[in-house]
Image (cartoon, grey):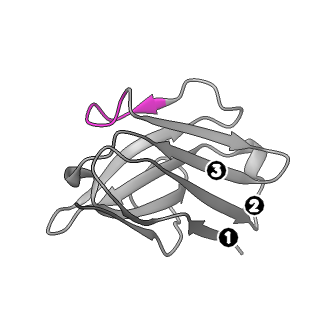
């Protein structure tokens, strides 16, 4: 079955960086479009970044463009999200999604807290 396990979250000061990882199994990762989404406190699910199956055409939400980078290693079935210049508004649970839709399968999430 589809399994997605996120890691790399934590507490970071404003302006800091984190790199999230997602280990995928149970499906053909190299053929899959993938996405990072997040849920901020009291808010709905928000897409953050998407990656087509070969890593082409990465797309970013306006709020993270220029600060976040999505990447993948198809040989290792890994999806990444490099986050830089973090702000308190980036505080959220971050989810790795198999697919580009909000209701697509996802992992348990990893908490990112940006606070001084």
Q: Is residue 64 above or below residue 100?
A: above
Which percent across, then down, holds residue 98?
Answer: 58, 56
44 sits to left or right of 77: left
Q: Is residue 2 above or below residue 90?
A: below
| First-in-chain label (3 vs 2) | 2
Tags 3 and 2 touching, CB below 8 Å: no
Residue wearing tag 3:
79
The residue closer to the viewer here, 68 or 25, is: 68
Q: Which mark is residue 2?
A: 1
Distance, label 1 to label 2, CA atoms, is 6 Å
| First-in-chain label (3 vs 1) | 1
Q: Which residues are magenta?
A: 59-65
Which percent across, then down, holds residue 65?
Answer: 36, 29
Distance, label 3 to label 1, CA atoms, is 14 Å
65 sits to left or right of 87: right
The residue closer to the viewer here, 108 or 31, is: 108
Q: Quadrant of the N terminus?
A: bottom right
Q: Residues within 10 Å of mark 3 (few under 14, many from 20)?
A: many
Residue wearing tag 2:
27
Which percent across, then down, holds residue 29?
Answer: 74, 51
Q: Quadrant of residue 77?
A: bottom right
Please report the residue visible at 57 percent of the width from the left and 66 percent of the height from the top.
Answer: 6
Residue 89 belongs to magenta span: no
Q: Quadrant of the C terminus?
A: bottom left
Please report the residue visible at 26 percent of the width from the left and 36 percent of the height from the top.
Answer: 63
Tags 1 and 2 touching, CB below 8 Å: yes
89 sits to left or right of 13: left
Residue 64 belongs to magenta span: yes
Please report the residue visible at 41 percent of the width from the left and 40 percent of the height from the top.
Answer: 84
> What kind of element bears circle 3?
strand
Q: Is residue 61 above or below residue 47?
A: above
């Amino acid at each position: 079955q589809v399994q997605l396990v996120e890691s790399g979250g934590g507490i970071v000061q404003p302006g800091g960086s984190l790199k999230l990882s997602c280990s995928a199994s149970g499906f053909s990762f190299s053929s899959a479009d993938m996405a990072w989404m997040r849920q901020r406190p009291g808010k709905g699910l928000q897409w953050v970044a998407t990656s087509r199956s070969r890593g082409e055409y990465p797309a970013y939400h306006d709020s993270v463009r220029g600060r976040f980078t999505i990447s993948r290693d198809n040989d290792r079935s890994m999806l990444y999200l490099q986050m830089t210049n973090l702000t308190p508004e980036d505080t959220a649970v971050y989810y790795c999604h198999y697919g580009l839709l909000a209701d697509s399968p996802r992992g348990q999430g990893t908490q990112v807290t940006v606070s001084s």
